[in-house]
Image (cartoon, helix red, strand yellow):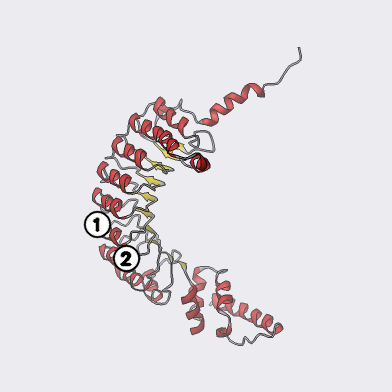
Amino acid sequence: MRETEGLNSSFEKLMVFGAAESMSITEWKDVPVELLLRILSLVDDQTVIVASGVCHGWRDAISWGLTRLSLSWCKRSMNDLVLSLAPKFTKLQALGLRQDTPQLHDDAVEAIAAHCHELQELDLSKSFRLTDRSLYALAHGCPELVKLNISGCTGFSDSALGYLTGCCRKLKTLNLCGCVRTATDRALKAIGYNCHQMQSLNLGWCDRVGDEGVKSLAYGCPNLRALDLCGCVLITDESVVALANNCLHLRSLGLYFCQNITDRAMYSLAQSRVKNKHDVWASVKSRYEEEGLTNLNISQCTALTPPAVQALCDSFPDLHTCPGRHSLIISGCLNLTSVHCACASMHAHRAPHAMPHFAH
């Protein structure tokens, strides 16, 4: 195998170097663990798996030192690969299992939960075959989870997600995009009650999410930095007002196609900037300057008017409508074409000074 030949070549070079330094390295097992891990940090994850089969010494060293692994390159038999690797790589802290075509079954996730108790980050996106069994297993076996991506996993129920949040209370990043059955008001109430450290939540196209769920998030997760509500057609101004009043660190908000959103929501967000400013001491002024919305998607929110959105731009100078810096997305809102960001005002003030001076 090509990977094994490459490892053998590296080992031969290592032995030559070792001889020059009077090191006693005659077999693979003699390579110091620290050096081995350094070598493995320079190769891809597929080669790491091949290396784990070189000998017992390598396998044990990799099992002890490997903390991050992605199997997203595996186009078939990922389930069997996970079942064989989970008992070996027990120190994993981050595991990527994103699939182009569904391969994983519940038994693979159960194996991860049974052996990888230090796992903090897990990507299971597009795992269409998984059921609630997987979430219950993770709840019991991986309480240290901080980041979980189950976008596109349509087999999970809201009750299973609620149970998971009760056990994995350290969650800070959760991607539920497209999880229509999973992301409901009931589930969001559980997140708000259990996961007070939540900072980033993607609820894109979860059309069962309503105001009650979002308000529970706003009250229970005041440290939210990013929230994607694109396609959550049931929400109204009530959701945005709750976020504006309680999540003063919010930096990114997606409201694409939320057509029940009106000017009231925009003015509430603009006013939150003033509220945040009053709550910040002068000694931490620099921190305040780093706060505030930097990304907002209000495309297809056709009820909004220019004065309300302009007030938002004036409150948050990091929202840009200028070319190359679009962080305020207003496509599909033809009545907002007159809205401009702080850059436009700056250019307007500079324009007279840029005019050439002609001799009289």
Q: Secondary structure at mark 2?
A: helix
| Amino acid identity at mark 2 | Leu
Q: Nearer the viewer, residue 91 or 47?
A: 91
Q: Is residue 269 left or right of residue 260?
A: right
Label 1 or label 2, whichever comes before in sequence order: 2
Alpha-carbon distance for marks 1 and 2?
A: 14 Å
Residue 232, image x and y in percent? 30, 42
Residue 277 appears left or right of 189 = right
Residue at x 52%, y 72% (from the top left corner): 47
| Residue 149, x across and y down, in percent | 37, 57
Which image quarter is the C terminus in?
top right
Q: Secondary structure at mark 1?
A: loop
Q: Which residue is mark 1?
A: 157
**Residue linked to disc 2:** 138
Residue drawn where x is 47% and y is 40% of the image: 281
Q: Is residue 155 visible from the viewing direction of this image?
A: no
- The residue type indicated by label 1 comes to Ser
Count residues near mark 1 (Cα–Cα under 10 Å), then give few for <14, some for 14-19, many for 20+. Answer: some
At which x and y percent is residue 135? 29, 63
Q: Residues within 10 Å of mark 2 (few under 14, many from 20)?
A: many
